Structure formats: C-alpha cells, structure tokens
Image (tube, grey):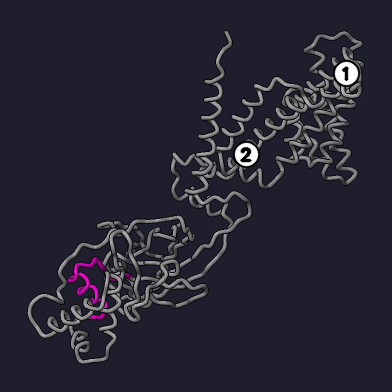
Amino acid sequence: MKESRAPFYILVLILLCVGIGLTWYRHVTWQIPWLPGEKQEVWSVEARVEFTGTGQPVMASLAIPESQSGFEKLNEFTASPGYGLAYQTKNGVRRAEWSVRSAQGNQVLYYRAEFVVNDNLVVPQAPPPISGSRLLMGDGPQITVARSMLERARQRSADVFTLTRELIREFNSEDEAVALLQQYGEREEWLVALLQEAGIRAREVAVLELEDGRRRSQLSDYLQIFSGERYMLIDPQTSTEEDSLDLLMWEYRSQPVLDIVGGVNSRLSFSVIEQERPVSDIVQQRSEAFSKVMDFSIHLLPLSEQTLFKGILLIPIGVLVVCLLRILIGIKTAGTFMPVLIAIAFIQTTLITGLVGFVLIVGVGLLIRGYLSQLNLLLVARISTVIITVIMLISMLAVLSYQLGLSEGLKISFFPMIILSWTIERMSILWEEEGGKEVFMQVGGSLLTAVITYALMMNEYIQHLTFNFLGLQLVIMAFVLLLGTYTGYRVLELHRFYALVKRK
C-alpha cells in the first residue's frame, strides 16, 4: 500500500506559511524594507532649558514626548554636567527630572530625542474626561458672555469640529465681550472650558512645529478635539486644522511643560534637524531600545556576533543552489556540500585568488597523493600526510605572494585545510577507480557550483534579506524538502535521448 504524502505536503505548507508570516511581520512591525540601502526620515529635537540658580537646591522637571501616531521614538539623550538625572513616570506622564544640591548663576540643561517618521504607527490617544472648569463656576458677567458666545457658535455648527471653528471665530472678533473674558483667563483656557461645557472632549496641548534647521523655536498651544476615537489638532488663533505629521505633540496630559524649583528666569527653547538615515541603523537602534525576545532579531546580538551570523545565514542559499544543480541539472560535485565551503572561502579570498589557490593546492596535492599511493600506507597515515602537505603548500603560497608584493595571496589561508585534504584523497581514489575524466568533471562541477554560490552570497539584496528576515530560512527549507521529492530526469541526462529524436 502506497504511503500517503499528505503529512509531508502539510509540513511544507506550514513551513512556507510560517516563514512568509514571520517575514511579513518583520517588514510591517519593524519597517524593514525589502531592498537594501533605503533610508528613513528622522527628526532630532533638542530642548534647551535655561534658568538662573539662586544658590539653593534645584529640582528641574521637563515633560518629554513619547511615541505617537506618525512618530516613533528611537532614543533620547541628556547633557547635564553636575546634575543627577532620573526619568519619572507619574499618573501616566513621563518626565525628565534633574537635581543638584546647589546651583548659582546661569544654568543650561539639554534633552534630545530622535523620532523616525512611521506612517504605519498608530498610538491611540485617551480623550480627557468631561469636567467643569473654574472659569465657568459661580456667577458673573463673564460667564453669561461666554455661554452666549457658545450658543451662537452652536447655531452655526454641524459637528464638534465645526463648533470649534465657529467658537474660535467668536473669539477672533474684536469686541468688548472678548476683552472681558481675557481678564479672567487665556483664550485657550476659555475655548477648552466652553467645548467641555458643550460635551466635547477637548484639551490644550503643547506642540512643536517640525521644520528642518530651526533654532530657538518655541512650543505652540493647540486644541486637541476628540470625536470618538478620532482627534484633530486645531490652531486656536486661526481655527485651521493642522497636519499632525508636521507637529510633534510635546505635552498632552494637561501638565506643565517645565517646572523648576530653586531657580528663576527659566526659558525653554528647541532646535530641530531633519536627517535621513539608513534603515539598518534604525533597526539596530530599535533592537537595542526594546530587546523583545519575541522579535527574535539578530540585531539583538553584539555586533561581533552579528557579523558572524551575517555569513552563517547565507549558507542556506548555498545549500539551495547545490540542491538545484545536483537534483535538477545533474552537475556532479566533489562531496555534497563541498562547493558551499569553497564559496565561503572565496568570500574571504576574493574569487580570482580563491580559484587560483584552489587549483594549485588540489593539483599539487594530487601529484603528491599519487606518490603516496605507491607506498601502500594506512588510511590515517596517508590522510595525515596530505593534511601536512596542504598546510605546507598554503604557507609557501602565502610567503611567495608576500615576497612578490601580492597581498591578496595572503588570504589563501582562509581555505578549509581539512576539507581540502579530504578532497585530494577522494579525487585521488576516484582517479584510480574511474579515471581522470571523472575527476575533472567533479572538480569542474564543484568550482562551477562554488562560483554560482559565491555570486549569490555576495549579492547585496540576498545579504539584506537573509540577515533581516529570519523567516526566509523556513521558506528555503520548504523548497529544499520539495526538491527532495523530485525523481524525474536531470537536464544533463537528456542528451541520452538525442538519438531517439534524431531518428524521428
């Protein structure tokens, strides 16, 4: 009874789905592009805090922004010589706090954060609760005036956003009513209070306009208006809706932006620079910042280990090439995966140097092995002698290259000596049993396979994909398993049927 192949094909399908899924997850979640060399837009924002110390203990607290829709925070830095620094989170608000026992005279503190533009990042904003404002408590003419302005704006509006727009237009009118209200509070305070009075979730937020090369810029007060889960940033002066992709919300929890105890004359200014950075650098910074085990990224390893794995992850590409050439094409090689090892050596030696070195070492080794076969030595002694011979040949080639001023020849030492020795032994036995033609076919097939593998391994697109998308290893495995089920004719075997075609 023929065994069912269904479990095998299910396994292959699972490998393909999991591999493609992991690859897609890395692309979407970490914003890793499919092609190498791509860059992403990064905004570097530096806050400069200045104040005058009075000789007393100082506690400076600065609101700091976090990742938000459209902007992913990569890292943050501070420069505050002589100050202690701590990042504190209170009531869901994260702040940078500097402290020092005594400060006298002019003091300057710096905080810098880097944000990468990420259009796919959506960070939900929790709308503020509806609460009464102090401005609308009690009795007074200002409350009557404010509520009448709200009623007029309500009559000319259709939704929360148009109501906000019409209410701002009421405040832009130059009349005595507006002047009266400004005696009791700022424009933004009144707008938030009246919108809350109308049942609209609104709050005042401090935003920074992102413009490349700006120095000494200041935060601007905007209104954040919510309608369900959607929100809008509106300029309280012009009533225009602003593009949130050009504005970084620095503080949006109704907390003071800067609070200093022990200092006077505080000033806060910002500098903004736009940069384009390679995606590989951004991915590295993300990995260092988050270090999530479930992300299973090579970028979590030390740089020295990353370099090692960058080469190791290319080996499955060579394995796939060997399977394709041996199973489908029918190319014979000296050993199953010897071409992959030769290709790895070519990466270290460069292609031309590697080819010349391989031919010289194997050629001379075969001559010496031919002499050893006449001595009727035991296998262990014979292989040991070949290994020593290979080491001597590599050493002599390296010294000769150095004396001739050919620095590339020094890289010949990267060849796997033990593997070369076994190759020489195997080729020698093959020569005795099958003849020189078979030896040349297998050595030539090995070199051809090694050159093709080397070309693919050195391709920057393949290096980028294998290093950044581990899921592709499962995809390669699935294809190798499928190749293992092939039982048809190889391409190089089709010449046997040429006579039948010619007769027809």
**Which residue shows up at 12% across the image and 82% down it?**
144
Where's residue 318, x and y in %?
A: 70, 33
**Which residue shows up at 84% across the image and 20% down it?**
427
Left or right of 410 in this view: 375? right
| Image disc number at residue 308 | 2
Q: How many residues crowd around disc 2 within 10 Å: few (fewer than 14), some, or many (20 or more)?
A: few
The C terminus lies in which quarter of the figure? top right
Contact (Cβ within 8 Å) of mark 2 with mark 1: no
Above or below, comparing residue 432 to residue 473 in the picture: above
Q: CA distance from mark 2 to mark 1?
A: 35 Å
Where's residue 410, x and y in %?
A: 81, 40
Quadrant in the rendering for residue 459: top right
Q: Secondary structure at mark 2?
A: helix
Magenta residues, as a range? Answer: 186-205
Residue 189 magenta-highlighted: yes
Left or right of 49 in this view: 321? right
Quadrant in the rendering for residue 496: top right
In the displayed orientation, state which residue is furthest to the front. Answer: 504
| Image disc number at residue 369 | 1
Q: Amino acid at mark 2?
A: Leu
Residue 439 magenta-highlighted: no
**Which residue shows up at 29% across the image and 68% down it?**
225
Above or below, comparing residue 347 to residue 99 in the picture: above
Q: Which residue occupies the foreground of this view, 341 or 204? A: 204
Q: Secondary structure at mark 1?
A: helix
Q: Earlier in the sequence, mark 2 or mark 1?
A: 2
Quadrant in the rendering for residue 312: top right
